[in-house]
């Protein structure tokens, strides 16, 4: 079905509000970063307190419903109709994996297991004696980057987008998530404009943060390895190289640059895993992964729903939930764009099962190696981590690995490509969200790729405080986005039933009618 085109005025309004908000953020930070940081911290605490319980329930419910749909007759639904997929399964999986993991795929995988190993998470601290600190550290990391995190980024939400865009002809925009509620009126309704704007702001903040963060992290690494001063000039040069890479990738499109970069990244990651397992502490890593997964699965529900007192939840679990939820609508667009021709079961298995298992093993490989070296020599990894944070942990671990002279630069290259694959895909998704086009114009992709880099450059000029403020702001932007995603818990199954009927998967008597109510639409403001 041919997609409708958004009105020019509406596109300009969405672009203006989204870009204007980012500009306002930068201006306020330049005027008084300390005051703005204080406002953000107050808002951060309020959002965590009010929306935290909702996020925990939504993340769990979203995973359960996606699994139920994927492994029943609805799993046979063909996304976008009976057409052939646009790319091979490997390339499809590579793009999905690299888009989410970003810098977290390296820096957090090195540091987070170590943090939880050194300081036992609340859910395990209150448990009976006998739980290994190693297993507890990995299990908590698996929770943050595992099944629920991945399912939030493109299962039910992507299904709703696929139906609205490919089956009903709506433009490819975040507002399509409201189509089952508002019908085609969503294309001109003010709620649609709000949905687009908050989704773009959230994903822009979630992408600019890692882009700027990477510049500071690599600056630290170059200073430690080569003696270069980690100043703004070095960070700006690193940022410029990163922006150039992902801008070229975004401009060449999904079928070329984005797929190629993602595939190369996955191949390099597999090579590094093989080297660590074969020549490093492979036995320890495999044992730790199995024990950590066992604990993760056994205590899955307590970790998912427990709300311990204090600030731990806000700075760990709920920070990640806010980050992933903020990415949700734009990831839904992107996954809907690259998954046409796949079945719903393929999507659920890839996003909610395979990707989390691969991610968890990656965390066990890099983070587990760090724990192994820390167990061997106390302070070898923990002291650099305490002194220098995430980049120090990565550097400390890679320097202990076999063939360190190769592994250290290889991991730095891997980190750059990880962040670049998120930058290119999100620049592409933002261009789609504003234009509504299945394949947005090249100049629009380039504009948003450069815009995110420019904002990161300005924030870097203010020091790490600007980037840290944006990192906390990510959680705040997730508050309105979570309200946009909340309905997919019931509209997702409804859409699945409609699609299954139209594709002959469920019989006529089970049809769940999708009503376009003109009277209802006419009453909407």
Image (cartoon, rainbow, N blue to C red):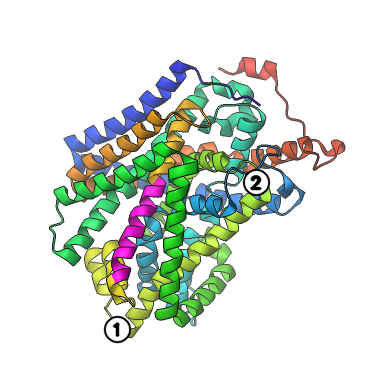
Q: Is residue 335 above or below residue 407?
A: above
Dominant SS type (magenta): helix
Disc 2: which residue:
342
Left or right of 204 in this view: 514? right
Residue at left 51%, top 33%? 174
Q: Residue at x 31, y 61 (%)?
A: 412
Residue denoted by label 1: 377
User: Which quadrant does the C terminus fall into?
Assistant: top right
In the drawing, does residue 351 fall left or right of residue 76? left
Q: Residue at x 58, y 22 (%)?
A: 4
Which quadrant is home to the N terminus?
A: top right
Residue 492 image label: none
Find the magenta span and give its range: 406-422
Q: Nearer the viewer, residue 224 or 151?
A: 224
Badge 2 crowding class, 10 Å Cα cut-off, few under 14, some 14 to 19, many 20 or more, is many
| Mark 1 neighbour density, 10 Å: few (under 14) some (14–19) many (20 or more) | few
């Amino acid at each position: 079905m041919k997609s409708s085109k958004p009105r020019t005025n509406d596109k300009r309004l969405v672009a203006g509000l989204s870009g204007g908000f980012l500009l306002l953020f930068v201006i306020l930070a330049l005027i008084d970063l300390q005051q703005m940081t204080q406002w953000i911290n107050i808002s951060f605490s309020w959002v965590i307190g009010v929306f935290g319980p909702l996020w925990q329930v939504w993340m769990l419910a979203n995973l359960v419903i996606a699994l139920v749909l994927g492994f029943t007759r609805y799993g046979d639904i063909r996304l976008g109709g009976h057409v052939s997929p646009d790319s091979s399964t490997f390339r499809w999986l590579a793009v999905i994996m690299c888009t989410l993991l970003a810098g977290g795929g390296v820096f957090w995988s090195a540091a987070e297991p170590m943090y939880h190993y050194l300081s036992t998470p609340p859910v395990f601290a209150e448990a009976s004696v006998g739980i290994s600190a190693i297993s507890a550290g990995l299990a908590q990391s698996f929770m943050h980057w595992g099944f629920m995190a991945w399912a939030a980024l493109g299962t039910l939400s992507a299904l709703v987008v696929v139906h609205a865009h490919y089956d009903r002809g709506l433009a490819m925009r975040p507002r399509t998530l409201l189509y089952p509620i508002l019908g085609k009126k969503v294309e001109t309704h003010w709620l649609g404009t709000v949905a687009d704007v908050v989704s773009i702001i959230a994903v822009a903040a979630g992408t600019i943060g890692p882009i700027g963060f990477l510049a500071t992290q690599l600056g630290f690494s170059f200073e430690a390895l080569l003696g270069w001063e980690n100043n703004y000039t070095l960070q700006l040069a690193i940022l410029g190289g990163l922006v150039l890479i992902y801008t070229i990738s975004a401009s060449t499109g999904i079928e070329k640059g984005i797929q190629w970069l993602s595939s190369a990244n996955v191949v390099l990651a597999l090579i590094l895993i093989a080297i660590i397992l074969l020549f490093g502490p492979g036995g320890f890593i495999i044992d730790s992964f199995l024990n950590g997964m066992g604990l993760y699965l056994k205590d899955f529900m307590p970790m998912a729903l427990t709300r311990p007192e204090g600030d731990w939840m806000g700075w760990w679990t709920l920070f990640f939930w806010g980050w992933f939820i903020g990415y949700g609508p734009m990831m839904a667009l992107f996954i809907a764009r690259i998954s046409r021709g796949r079945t719903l079961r393929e999507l659920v298995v890839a996003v909610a099962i395979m990707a989390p298992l691969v991610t968890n093993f990656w965390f066990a490989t890099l983070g587990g190696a760090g724990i192994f070296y820390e167990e061997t020599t106390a302070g070898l990894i923990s002291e650099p981590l305490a002194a220098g944070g995430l980049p120090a942990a990565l550097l400390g671990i890679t320097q202990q690995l076999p063939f360190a002279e190769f592994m250290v630069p290889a991991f730095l290259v891997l980190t750059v490509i990880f962040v670049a694959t998120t930058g290119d895909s999100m620049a592409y998704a933002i261009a789609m969200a504003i234009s509504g086009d299945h394949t947005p114009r090249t100049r629009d992709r380039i504009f948003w790729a450069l815009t995110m880099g420019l904002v990161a450059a300005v924030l870097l000029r203010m020091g790490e405080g600007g980037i840290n403020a944006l990192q906390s702001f990510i959680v705040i932007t997730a508050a309105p986005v979570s309200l946009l995603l909340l309905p997919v818990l019931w509209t997702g199954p409804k859409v699945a039933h409609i699609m299954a009927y139209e594709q002959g998967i469920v019989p006529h008597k089970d049809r769940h009618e999708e009503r376009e109510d003109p009277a209802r639409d006419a009453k909407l403001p």
